[in-house]
Amino acid sequence: MTDQLFKGYSTFSNHGTSQGIIPRFYLQMVDIAQFAFDKEEGIEERLNDFLNKNISDFTEFYDLFTELKTIYIDYRDGLKNGKYYSLDDKISFRHDRSNELTLKKKVKDFFIQGRLVINNFGKSGVINDGEFILNNFLIVKDSNFKKNKLSCLNNPEGNKYKFLIEIIEEARKDFLSEFIQARADFEHQNLQVEDFKVEIVNSQIKVIEPSLSNTSLLSKIEYYYESTLDFVEVLMVFFYGIQAYKKTNGFMTLFKRDEFDYSNLHYKYVVMPNMYESGVTKLIG
């Protein structure tokens, strides 16, 4: 699947640079990691292993989200424009729910695949270092999170990753715990996606969309998708950014570009000399 790290890469499925997955979660990390670790520290092997074992999780998550969103919008709009719901002169209706059944299955698959992304990312070891073991902080009980946090921060080497632990802690509160619980409810508690409801108001079709946790289902799915990918990306770039800053005694540090385009390999995050540059925001130091 891969060529030698730092010299090239191969594509698989239909996921080259245009979808943004490989540039965002592999090539960008390769670019940053070269400033963070020496070759003999094994970073080539670590990222190469991540590419081979984990990137397919992200591409499948991308595919599921894209397909789910397409089906959702098509069905919602089709209920309004007569494709899936229509009335005759006697106000008798025709309602084709076949795509709604497909959508419900995709929603369940989305949560299962999203948890897989997080779970396998945690187990990958791609950003483990000494006392900082990522899998100790992701899909764990709150009590275990607190115990593992104290253990890591009480260690001089682990303490340098305090900011990463704070990012994880905030993510757990904002979306991660809720997302993991929703997945468990769908898979083990038979949680069901609400039906689309159609009402006739003054002979006009009104569509009431399903919700999840008191939020529009599609909006919630989009939030979970974007939050999951942002979370993984931020953890990875800050891990390598912290290493680069310490390795170079602050000469090199992590920046975020104001404008970026993964499809053209113009990455959002970059390690550069620690000085003022227009168009970027310094994140460390």
Image: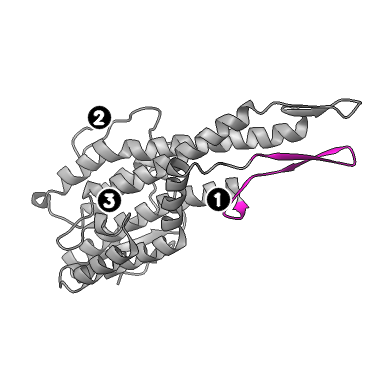
Please identify, in this view, whether the residue under mark 1 or under mark 2 is nearer the observer. Answer: 1
Q: Secondary structure at mark 2?
A: loop
Residue 30 percent location from the top left of the image: 25, 47
Residue nearest the viewer, comparing 92 with 30: 92
Indicate whether 117 appears above or below 10: below
Give yes or no for residue 117 being in the magenta stretch: no
Disc 2 to disc 3, C-alpha distance: 22 Å
Q: Quadrant of residue 70?
A: top right
Tag of residue 122: 3
Residue annotated with mark 1:
220
The quarter of the image holding the C terminus is bottom left
Do residues under tags 1 and 2 come within 8 Å of each other at their CB atoms? no
Please, what is the three-letter code of the amino acid marked with disc 3?
Gly
Tag of residue 1: 2
Chief secondary structure of the magenta portion: strand
Indicate whether 177 appears above or below 77: below
| Residue drawn at point x = 66 percent, y = 33 percent | 75
| Residue drawn at point x = 40 percent, y = 28 percent | 14
Disc 1 to disc 3, C-alpha distance: 23 Å
Question: Is residue 116 shown to the viewer in this render?
Answer: yes
Please, what is the three-letter code of the amino acid marked with disc 2?
Met
Q: Residues within 10 Å of mark 2 (few under 14, many from 20)?
A: few
Tag of residue 170: none
Indicate whether 127 appears above or below 262: below
Q: Quadrant of residue 95?
A: top right
